[in-house]
Amino acid sequence: MKAAHENWGSRLGFILATAGSAIGLGNIWKFPYITGENGGAAFIIIYLGIVFTIGLSVMLAEIAIGRHAQTDAISAFRKIGKPGWTFVGVLGVVTAVIILSFYSVVAGWCIAYVVKSAGGAFSGMDAEAIGGAFGSFIGSPVAPIVYHGIFASLTMAVVIGGVSGGIEKASKFLMPMLFVILIALVARSVTLPGAARGLEFFLAPDFSKISAHTVMAALGQAFFSLSLGMAILLTFGSYVDKQTNLGKSAVQIAFLDTLVAILAGLAILPAVFAFGMDPAAGPGLTFVTLPTVFNSMPGGYFFAIIFFVLLTIAALTSSVSVLEPVVAFFTNMGLSRKTATIGSGVIIFLLGIPSSLSVGIWSDIHFIKEQGFLDSASWLTDKLLLPIGGLLICIFAGWIIAPVMAREVAGDGGPGVLTKAWLFILRFVAPVAIFLILLSGLEIVAF
Ligand code: PHE
């Protein structure tokens, strides 16, 4: 017999676990470099606009579907009586496998940086030397794959052992610590000589930099960072009790996630300018800038180690949430939890190998839009699969089961203004916006 469906210990537990999924490499590694590539402040304004309209609405919809169905993303649609929609859960699983494959590679770099920082590998180096060391490390054929394997194994170990005990308790203590370290880094970064230009880049918008690509990058980043579009939050929502106010919770989660992204941007981009680096340098930005900042701050040696440990843990709380629905899918098909986890973990590890090689010896092999494997996998998920997943969630919650959703979110008092506004965004604004952004970003139509 199946055990009764579990619940979160408390509302705070739910908020922190969901924030643990949302806050990860997407905020600290990806957000600063995507902001850098897309022109700074104007991108941030668009990003904020998308997070607090479309992002928040899709997040609330996923959580509400989950709480209503009281089961995982694969079974949820059947249980609600719409088995034809099960493919949304399946699409989420495919997306999860692709995301995790490259996510684990980058998280492996974080583990390597713990080791390197502890060994004093960057001490006394300037930005250029650190950049060179980063390039040769990620470009080497074996070491990054070993670290990717270590991270993938950690993720599997946590998923086999169950999320609730260890990692949930640990993140209650570790996430606030990450926050404190980030604030210390921001303080150092913005007071570096020459940081003002970076602050200007980050805070003073230049709207001539905005194009359909910018908007699409912001949408993809919003979905990635909030862990949307792959039905992860649906599973998390299924553990929420009926008393919890879903709208308020979603606002708090989105706020925390965005706060960490902005802090990471403020820690990284001013330093990029202070050290004369290129803000559009791409995925290496964090790994080159921060060790340079650590070198210039008192106690930097210890800060560096603690920071990369925390970043690895933040990545782990996210990667666990990505692996979980994949495992749920295979256990649903009759595999044991252990077999399902190891089986999918190995597939993800193998799929990560070309991602890792693509920033080194395979850098000449191109897939989508002249990009290597890692960038192609990231493009495919950010620009296509996550928005499509989000679009389907909007249609499902806003059109197929809207009355049920309204009840789920509004509670006993009946739908108020906010619930109605949310349903309006879900039914009209979000699907149309996502659809148009998809088309224009794919260059099917031009605006
Ligand atoms: N949101 C996580 C991050 O920002 C990554 C993630 C993406 C997690 C998609 C789940 C789903 O790092």
Image (cartoon, grey):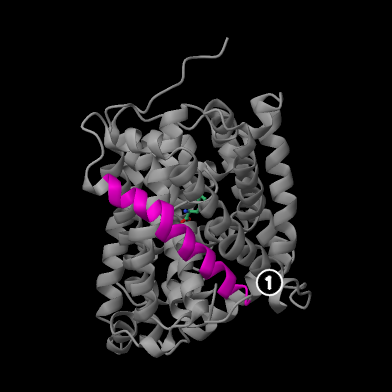
Residue 351 spot, x, y in % from top left: 73, 54
**Residue 406 location, quadrant:** top left
User: Which of 394 and 282 lies nearest the eye of the viewer?
Assistant: 394
Q: Is residue 29 left or right of residue 178?
A: right
Residue closest to the eye, 419 or 362: 419
The local crowd at label 1, few if under 14, some if 14 to 19, many if 20 or more residues have their Cα within 10 Å, is many
Q: Which residue is drawn at the image coordinates 27% and 28% (left, top)? A: 243
**Residue that carries the numbered disc 1 in the rendered image:** 359
Q: Is residue 3 above or below residue 371?
A: above
Residue 12 in percent (x, y) is at 28, 36
- Vertical placement of 443 versus 343: above or below? below
Magenta stretch, main secondary structure class: helix
- Disc 1 residue type (three-letter): Val
Position of 81 compared to 4: left or right? right
Q: Is residue 411 above or below residue 93?
A: above
Residue 371 seen in this snapshot: no
Foreground of the two, 293 or 355 = 355
Q: Is residue 80 magenta?
A: no
- Boundaries of the magenta span: 419-443
Q: Residue at x 69, y 48 (%)?
A: 348
Estimate the x, y position of residue 149 in percent, counting from the top left.
67, 50
